[in-house]
Amino acid sequence: MKLTLITERLIIAGGIILSIFISLTTLKYEIEKDHLFFESRANKVFNQIKEAFENVGRINREFNSLFYLLDEVSEDEFRLLAGSLLRQNRFIELVYFAEKVPLKNKSEYEKAMQEEGYTGFSITQLNESVNKTAAPEHEFLFPVKYIEPFNVKNSRWFGRDLLTFSVVQHAIQALPENPELLLFMPAEKEKKRLFAVQILFNGYSDNIGNRGLNDVFGILLYKINMFKIQAVMGTPDFFSTVQITLDDNLILPAKAAVADSIWLTKFEVEKSISLGKQRLSIQLTQNKSLLELNLMMPLIVLIAGLFITLFIWHIIRAHIEHNRLLAEQKKIIEDEVNTKTRELSQKTNELSNAYNQQLALTEELEAFSYSVSHDLRAPLRALDGFSRALEEDYHALLDDNAQDYLQRICKASQRMATLIDALLSLSRITRQDLLLQHFSVSELVTEIMSNLYTEFPQRDIEVVIADKMEITADKTLMYIVFENLIRNAWKYTKNEANPTIEIGEALQDGQKVFFVKDNGVGFEMAFADRLFGSFQRLHHQRDFEGEGIGLATAKRIIMRHHGKIWATAEVNKGATFYFTVAPLAAKS
């Protein structure tokens, strides 16, 4: 009992520990699944940002092509191209083009622009609110000539010298290292804004050499709204923080960090995009509390584990109780077994005695058959012989009634002999051993029909025999079955104008069924149970000859093959006899 109690406690403790372990494993799987989903969303965001900056590069190449292919780009040409590209890429807020003007030609350039319709045009520096760094002196000016989109708000840039803009100044300082690259600079005064600067050199050559402002003919400036790029990501609230830096310069700041906790799961991914010699870094994080995770499956696993542990404990308890009951019932069962054993022994003795009695009856039946075969035939032959002698020797002395009586005596003795032969044949069939073999039923039936045509050449009857019918049975006994059934059909169609007999097979409930069908006189189905009895007849002897033993013989043979036989009929419309045999019927 003590050992059983320890076993129960060990099973309960082990079940609880295993349930918690599997539940934690399931929770880990849920966390990994959320992590994979987070990485998928992060990759999508990364690809969208990368695609946006690739679009900036593509747009810049199209502008470069425009300025390098045309000697002079008109405002309409600039605005047509810029407007189309900006409508497709909403995150680019503005595109500026500044044309190089020698400092000594400032007045002439301003006058020329005024004559072109730009009244009040003058080249000025940017406001200190935008540019707090003093501009170095150069011998060239780069006033903004074209702006897209051009409106009241953006018109303040018109005529401003981009060399006084700190972003452009940084780009100019980087010329020795990046003479022809698109250079990205964060906006100092505007949050989530980024400028891209492209210096346009005279000529379109791969030989960059040591170029300076003397080789520049213009500057392209793109203003990029990082907030709109972030909006393209979709559902920004999915990420706890989104931080974008350009060469260690923070462009898109992250939200305030959440303190680490054991109840908090943090997913983080960081990737970089190469922008020429610059690098744009993107850091995405997601903080999830355990309550935000899908805890359904871990809870189900835990509850199921505890339930299974309880169930196993209940089974053990039931097993212990069951063993106790078995121990109590053991003696009772043993006593009952002993009692039943004695009763069985007694029944065995009774069955043995009954078997011996059956053997004795069988021997008596064989003795009776021998007596019938030998002792009864002699008086019948004597009765028949003396009746014939009396008729032949004293024919002239006997009147018609006496001669009729003698003929009836002869016929009765002959019929008695025929019945004795049939009865003996039926007895032999019951005791005969089966010799199973596989043979063609179609050939067997054809042989029987050939014998009948020879025996009754005057009969004109239509016979239909199915092809390729086969069976595994005792061939000699099956010959008797088919011969009795076919002779039965042959006999009961003798009064038909167009007699027909059909022998075939069919499938019923997956079992092969043989049938013999005729269009003869048929019979009432109410008397069908009398068909297969010995010496049972449904028609008078004077109408149809026979001893009434053929169908009984057929039934005995079918039963020996572990099959069944039955018939269906309708008066004056014929009858159909069916029978089955068990597959590979066992030898009786």
Image: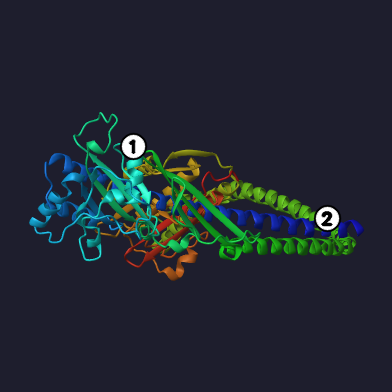
Quarter of the picture holding the N terminus: bottom right
Q: Amino acid at mark 1?
A: Asn
**Vertical arrangement, residue 245 with respect to residue 5, above or below:** above
At a point 19% along the width and 36% down the height, the residue shown is 202
Which mark's residue is nearer the viewer, 2 or 1?
Answer: 1
In x, y percent, where is residue 341? 84, 57
**Vertical arrangement, residue 300 with respect to residue 140, above or below:** below
Give the mark nearer the N terminus: 2 vs 1.
1
Q: Residue furthest right?
A: 2
Query: Badge 1 is on which residue?
Result: 178
Front residue of this view, candidates 368 and 94: 94
The numbered disc on residue 345 is: 2
**Vertical arrangement, residue 568 with respect to residue 59, above or below:** below
In x, y percent, where is residue 355? 74, 52
Q: Residue furthest left?
A: 115
**Vertical arrangement, residue 506 with respect to residue 568, above or below:** above
Q: Amino acid at mark 2?
A: Ser
Front residue of this view, candidates 165 and 417: 165
Residue 76 visible in the current orientation: no
Q: Is residue 284 left or right of residue 325?
A: left
In x, y percent, where is residue 190? 38, 59
Front residue of this view, candidates 221 and 66: 221
Q: Secondary structure at mark 1?
A: loop
